[in-house]
Image (spheres, grey):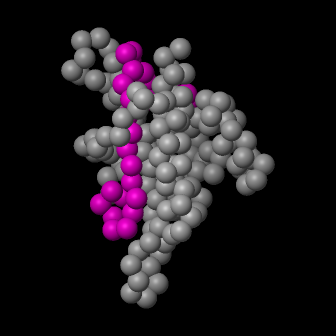
Amino acid sequence: MFNIKKCELPAGAFLQRYAEMEGCYTDCYCADIDRAVSFSEFVTAFYVTPLFKLERFVLNHLGSKPSTDRQARELSEAQIEHFAAWRVEQREPNQLLMCDLSDRTRSWFMAAPLAEQEESSTRLYFGSAVVPRPVVNDEMPTLGFTFRVLLGFHKLYSRALLSTAKAKLSRS
């Protein structure tokens, strides 16, 4: 996980509108890999790592939201719009924004070639957004107690997910 860096959102990132939203939490992590990686390869690798398969197992057994490796590949190739507990909110050839079924969290992926590298290299991005609860009366937007308690775990887990995806792609 030491090869995963916290970074700024790149220009044109779908997650940018959430970074600008009052009360919204966003993060962005990146990792460089010393080969050309297609966006489809990245998304597929992310969703089929053993670490993410554990999350898929939990979603299937506790939330009745099954998913398969084939569906992960179909999502990465823009053949389907729903995967486990998420739906596609926005898509371009090199980035994808997923929204959970509660409309509170977002997962964002992007892959971009590194022009400054002499060899073919790719920067992999993974970020999240947590949207505040709907405002009632004049109260301030809030993410809620549960998210505040889990924020440290969320940051560690996000880095671990990107790290395992990079490792999988490095072995390919």
| Whether residue 82 is visible | yes
Q: Position of residue 107 (x, y in %)?
A: 48, 48
80 is higher (above) or lower (below) than 106:
above
> Residue placed farthest to the bottom in the image?
137
Q: Residue at x 59, y 35 (%)?
A: 47
Q: Residue furthest right?
A: 61
Image point (36%, 35%), residue name: 5
From the top left corner, tell me how far across and down residue 66 is, in percent: 73, 45
Q: Is residue 29 left or right of residue 162?
A: left
The residue nearer to you, when weighing 67 against 32, is: 32
Instruction: Note whether 164 is above or below 138 in the view shown.
Output: above
Q: Is residue 42 magenta?
A: yes
Height in image: 155 above or below 122? Answer: below
How many marks are shown on the rendered structure?
Answer: 0
Q: Where does residue 82 sit, x and y in percent of width and height?
A: 60, 47
Q: Which picture quadrant has residue 138?
A: bottom left
Q: Judge left or right: residue 134 versus residue 101.
A: left
For image coordinates 49% across by 51% down, the residue present is 152
Q: Is residue 26 magenta?
A: yes
**Does residue 72 appear anywhere in the picture?**
no
Residue 26, percent from left and from top? 39, 54
Residue span colored magenta:
18-45
Viewer-nearest residue: 33 or 3: 3
Which residue sits at x=33%, y=56%? 19
Is residue 161 shown above or below 115?
Answer: below
